[in-house]
Image: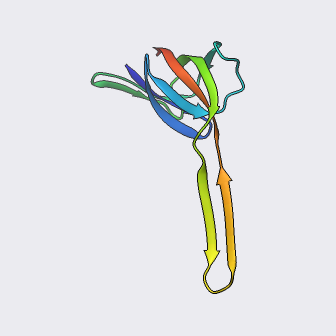
């Protein structure tokens, strides 16, 4: 069984037992969280598509860690104008483990 959930402005295809990194969620490490914005639930050939969400469906997960992704380097330059700009960005994330998908 798999599901498509929406969190942090992004959509993720999840399966029970899977570990994924999502946008930072304000939850303590070891706590259980529930995603109620389930857009699709599928099992084998049967698929339930929500409009916009599947009624009564939920995905429970456990918070494993919080962290920061690798640095993304940004370099802007205008040729012949003596303009150069260096920037860097590290996005925060929360690593979760999907426990159960209930439809």
In which quarter of the view is residue 95 placed? top right
Residue visible at 44% across and 21% down in the picture: 18
Residue found at x 63% / y 69%:
76
Name above or below for residue 30 compared with residue 7: above
| Up-down relation of residue 34 to residue 71 (above or below) | above
Which sits in the foreground, 26 or 47? 26
Nearer to me, 8 or 40: 8
Lateral position of residue 4 relative to residue 67, left or right:
left
How far from the left and from the top, in percent, is residue 8?
A: 62, 37
Q: Quadrant of residue 3?
A: top left
Residue found at the very far left of the displayed protein: 45
Q: Is residue 5 visible?
A: yes
Report the residue at 60% width, 40% height from top.
Answer: 9
Nearer the observer, 22 or 9? 22
Measured as percent of width and height from the top left, residue 37 is found at 57, 28
Q: Quadrant of residue 28?
A: top right
In this rendering, the count of numbered labels is: 0
Tell which of 90 and 94 is nearer to you.
90
Q: Residue at x 43, y 17 (%)?
A: 16
- Does residue 59 appear left or right of residue 88 in this picture? left
């Amino acid at each position: 069984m798999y599901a498509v959930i929406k969190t942090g402005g992004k959509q993720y295809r999840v399966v029970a037992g899977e570990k994924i990194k999502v946008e930072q969620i304000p939850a303590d490490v070891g706590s259980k969280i529930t995603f109620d914005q389930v857009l699709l639930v599928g099992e084998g050939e049967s698929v339930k598509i929500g409009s916009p969400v599947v009624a009564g469906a939920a995905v429970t997960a456990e918070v494993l860690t919080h962290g920061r992704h690798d640095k993304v380097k940004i370099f802007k330059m205008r040729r012949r104008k003596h303009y150069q700009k260096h920037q860097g960005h590290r996005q925060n994330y929360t690593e979760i483990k999907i426990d159960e998908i209930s439809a």
